[in-house]
Image (cartoon, helix red, strand yellow):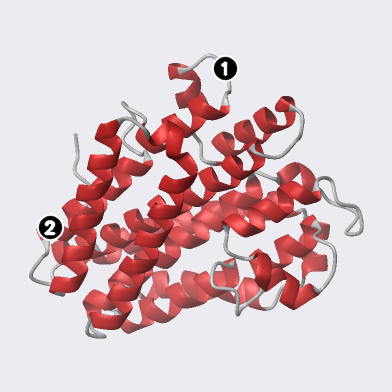
């Protein structure tokens, strides 16, 4: 496959997943804003999420104070930084448009109609008043895009590159959700003590994991059990273990003469999670582990770009 085509497929899928990840994070905070708790708690949670997304400084360049409405607007339609939810949907559509001949007509129509409708909604200027409905719509469109991809695309290299992009981005999103709650994941945290059960249940619901948690643990929601579910549970679709497994499997399907080291690193990342126990991560420090995981995932993405995709444009 041409590097240009692989590049568009990879980034098309990453942008769709990134839009969903932002929608889920906004959804979590929007639900929290409806709970009866101190405004200071919500501000601290919003600030932690901005820091986890590496957007804290950029946000403060546009706004002086942390306020739910302003943060939601910044993440959904923020101007001047190119990574808002609306920007992600546009970028996904533009990457798809560049390779329309590689995609099925159903997949192209899904991505195109998603962008056109999102653009119309944003132009109405009512997203602030409809935040909950809008992010729920984004999640539904992401689910539809993924279903059409799986249901209509041939299992060739095009499919595998789209899946590599999906799972690298999903692993990044899940890790950042946990990094945003790092204060509750410090070494020695008591699994029987719940800092804020409402906030953790909201986080699980935002990740479509609340029912999964109840089915697996059948106990009160605790930060360490949530971390175990989102890091080490192989049958949890958004867990780090599951995502790295899928990245490794799809990389093997498109391996070329220069990608052996990239494949080895992806396999090593998956093996580390596969053979790790929660107790070991707690002893090591969950926050530290998550930061190191994000760094390794970023390095893996860079290697995928070097081995398969277009070289970066030098300015």
Classed neighbour count for the residue bearing mark 1: other residues with Cα under 10 Å, few (<14), some (14–19), many (≥20): few
The quadrant the N terminus occupies is bottom left
Residue drawn at point x = 71 percent, y = 55 percent: 201
User: Toward the viewer: 236 or 109?
Assistant: 109
Instruction: Please identify the quadrant where the C terminus is shown.
Output: top left
Query: Under tag 1, what secondary structure?
Result: loop
Does residue 149 lie above or below 132 as drawn? below
Q: Which of marks 2 and 1 is nearer the N terminus?
A: 1
Q: Is residue 241 above or below residue 302?
A: below
Asked where in the image residue 305 lies, by quadrant, the reply is bottom left
The residue nearer to you, when weighing 11 against 96, is: 96
In the rendered structure, the answer to whether residue 60 lies left or right of residue 105 reads right
Q: Residue 234 placed where, x, y %?
A: 61, 78
Residue 164 in the figure: left or right of residue 267: left
Please tell me whether residue 73 is drawn above or below residue 159 in the rendered image: above
- On the question of residue 258 being in view, the answer is no
Residue at mark 2 to residue at mark 1: CA–CA distance? 39 Å
Answer whether labels 2 and 1 touch (C-beta < 8 Å): no
* Extreme residue in the left direction: 101
Q: Name the residue under label 1.
A: 65
């Amino acid at each position: 496959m041409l590097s240009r085509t692989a590049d568009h497929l990879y980034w098309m899928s990453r942008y769709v997943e990134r839009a969903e990840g932002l929608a889920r994070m906004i959804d979590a905070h929007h639900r929290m804003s409806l709970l009866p708790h101190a405004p200071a708690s919500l501000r601290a949670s919003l600030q932690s999420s901005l820091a986890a997304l590496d957007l804290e400084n950029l946000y403060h360049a546009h706004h002086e104070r942390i306020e739910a409405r302003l943060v939601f607007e910044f993440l959904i339609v923020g101007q001047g930084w190119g990574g808002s939810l609306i920007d992600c949907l546009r970028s996904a559509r533009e990457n798809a448009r560049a390779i329309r001949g590689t995609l099925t007509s159903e997949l192209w129509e899904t991505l195109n109609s998603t962008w056109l409708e999102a653009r119309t909604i944003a132009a109405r200027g009512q997203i602030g008043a409809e935040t909950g409905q809008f992010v729920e719509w984004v999640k539904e469109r992401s689910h539809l895009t993924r279903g059409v991809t799986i249901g209509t695309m041939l299992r060739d290299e095009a499919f595998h590159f789209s899946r590599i992009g999906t799972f690298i981005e999903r692993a990044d999103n899940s890790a950042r959700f946990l990094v945003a709650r790092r204060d509750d994941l410090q070494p020695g945290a008591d699994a029987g003590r719940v800092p804020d059960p409402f906030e953790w249940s909201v986080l699980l619901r935002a990740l479509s994991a609340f029912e999964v948690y109840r089915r697996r643990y059948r106990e009160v929601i605790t930060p360490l059990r949530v971390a175990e579910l989102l890091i080490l549970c192989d049958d949890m679709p958004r867990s780090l273990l599951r995502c790295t497994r899928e990245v490794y499997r799809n990389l093997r399907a498109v391996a070329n003469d220069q990608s052996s080291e990239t494949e080895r690193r992806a396999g090593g990342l998956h093996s580390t999670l596969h053979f790790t126990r929660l107790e070991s991560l707690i002893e090591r420090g969950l926050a530290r582990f998550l930061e190191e995981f994000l760094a390794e995932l970023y390095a893996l993405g860079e290697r995928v770009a070097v081995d398969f995709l277009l070289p970066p444009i030098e300015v």
